[in-house]
Image (cartoon, helix red, strand yellow):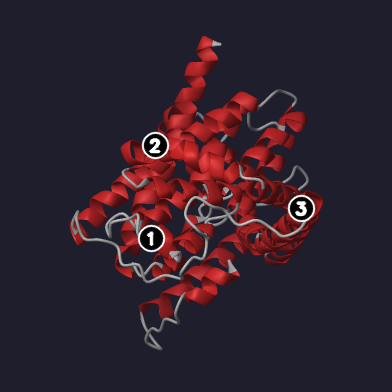
């Protein structure tokens, strides 16, 4: 994520503008709402205590998953499994996504890591020449739909013990739902880009030259043992960086969402962790006639998970554990969460910088719109596929 920020050029706005006056109203309005319901002291204490609880109980657990999965991902790449997966996926890309077979490498790399991994590929001249100009911006939508996929699937599957029932089918259905969302998002994006650039304009190859010969893959030096240890240690190190990078999202976004989701305890507000004003469940109840047939959520509180995934997938995962502990969700919810958390995977916080880095600033709004629709379709598809399979089996 830090590399992504370094690549994006500095932007400027007028010193005083409309947002200068609107933001303080919104910012202090949120605190006023929390304080009116909870009391200022309790609201501040709950905010700090919830952030601390999330750091100790959730972030460290997610970091451990990131380290293990980072090591596994590096091993899979080092010994050719990623290349094999790329070859297997290539024939599907053109008919399904409308993109060249090389785009399948973007699916694999972002699934094993995070959204910005697609930018490394985009700078490779040998990679760029496979694309026409209208196809290139859609890489943002394709890559984001699979960002942190391995971590999301592993976390959801590992929740089976806490839930007390197997979740393998739910996770697989969620993965299939994310694929549906990725197709919708990418295809919608191609409609806009084709109108802007035309269907025939070639892609300029002005990225960083790649020294990798065609049909070859780079490996680490040394014996097999050295390559194994190097992959494990380097992959684990990248997992540590990914684990640290999710801390702001979990502590800031998830704390706010939880305070808007949780309610007052039986004895009244005390300033303890996980207290709140139940605003999101109240809103969800108002539109339950829409949410229930679309997503089949088991409780109004479940809406907080995909809402949090808009900003950070890691933060949304931290809410799942608490919902399971309170018996508020079931396997269908896990399927929907897997699909939406993977497909959205914090796109509101990465899409702007990623499109900027691809020199496609004029398409930022359209990319966000397409991916919003794609994430909703992912959740809807996961729910109804799960219902169908549950009926059959």
Could you tell whether 142 is left or right of 224 in the image? left
Query: Quick one: SS at disc 1?
Result: helix
Whether residue 272 is visible, yes or no, is no
Given contact means CB atoms under 8 Å apart, are the residues at marks 1 and 3 in contact? no
Residue 96 placement: quadrant: top left
**Residue 168 % position (x, y):** 64, 26
Dot 1 crowding, Cα within 10 Å, few <14, some 14–19, many 20+: many
Q: What residue sits right under mark 2 in the picture?
A: 91
Earlier residue among tags 1 and 2:
2
Toward the viewer: 300 or 166?
166
Q: What residue sits right under mark 1 in the picture?
A: 128
Tally of numbered tags? 3
Earlier residue among tags 2 and 3:
2
Residue 312 placement: quadrant: bottom right
**Residue 144 % position (x, y):** 48, 52
Whether residue 358 is visible, yes or no, is yes
Mark 1 to mark 3 CA distance (whole Å): 30 Å
**Residue 10 % position (x, y):** 45, 82
**Residue 34 % position (x, y):** 61, 60
* Residue lying at the far top of the rendered structure: 392
Query: Quick one: SS at disc 3?
Result: helix
Image quarter in which the N terminus is found: bottom right
Could you tell whether 66 is left or right of 311 in the image? right
Given contact means CB atoms under 8 Å apart, are the residues at marks 2 and 3 in contact? no
Q: What residue sits right under mark 3 in the picture?
A: 232
Toward the viewer: 363 or 82?
82
Mark 2 to mark 3 CA distance (whole Å): 31 Å
Toward the viewer: 370 or 116?
116
Residue 128 placement: quadrant: bottom left
Q: Look at 71% across and 42% down and name the residue there.
A: 322
């Amino acid at each position: 994520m830090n590399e992504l920020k370094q690549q994006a050029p500095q932007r400027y706005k007028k010193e005083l503008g409309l947002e200068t006056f609107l933001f303080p109203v919104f910012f202090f309005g949120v605190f006023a709402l929390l304080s009116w319901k909870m009391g200022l002291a309790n609201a501040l204490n709950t905010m700090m205590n919830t952030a601390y609880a999330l750091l100790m109980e959730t972030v460290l657990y997610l970091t451990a998953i990131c380290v293990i999965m980072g090591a596994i991902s590096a091993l899979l790449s080092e010994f050719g499994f990623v290349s094999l997966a790329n070859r297997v996926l290539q024939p599907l890309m053109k008919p399904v996504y409308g993109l060249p077979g090389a785009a399948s490498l973007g699916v694999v790399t972002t699934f094993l890591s995070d959204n910005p991994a697609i930018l490394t590929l985009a700078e490779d001249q040998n990679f760029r020449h496979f694309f026409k100009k209208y196809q290139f911006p859609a890489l943002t939508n394709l890559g984001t739909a699979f960002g942190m996929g391995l971590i999301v699937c592993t976390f959801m599957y590992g929740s089976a013990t806490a839930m007390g029932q197997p979740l393998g089918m739910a996770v697989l259905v969620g993965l299939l739902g994310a694929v549906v969302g990725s197709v919708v998002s990418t295809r919608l994006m191609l409609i806009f880009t084709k109108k802007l650039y035309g269907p025939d304009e070639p892609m300029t190859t002005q990225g960083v030259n790649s020294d990798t010969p065609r049909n070859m893959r780079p490996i680490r030096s040394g014996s097999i043992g050295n390559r194994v240890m190097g992959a494990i240690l380097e992959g684990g190190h990248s997992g540590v960086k990914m684990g640290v990078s999710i801390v702001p999202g979990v502590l800031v976004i998830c704390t706010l969402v939880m305070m808007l989701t949780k309610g007052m305890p039986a004895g009244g507000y005390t300033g303890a962790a996980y207290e709140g004003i139940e605003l999101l469940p109240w809103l969800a109840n108002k539109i339950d006639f829409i949410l229930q047939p679309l997503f089949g959520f088991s409780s109004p509180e479940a809406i907080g998970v995909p809402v949090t995934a808009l900003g950070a997938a890691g933060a949304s995962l931290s809410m799942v554990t608490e919902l399971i502990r309170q018996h508020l969700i079931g396997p269908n919810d896990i399927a929907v969460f897997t699909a939406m958390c993977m497909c959205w995977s914090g796109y509101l916080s990465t899409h702007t910088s990623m499109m900027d880095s691809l020199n496609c600033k004029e398409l930022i709004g359209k990319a966000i719109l397409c991916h919003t629709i794609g994430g909703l379709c992912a959740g809807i598809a996961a729910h109804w596929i799960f219902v169908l399979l549950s009926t059959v089996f």
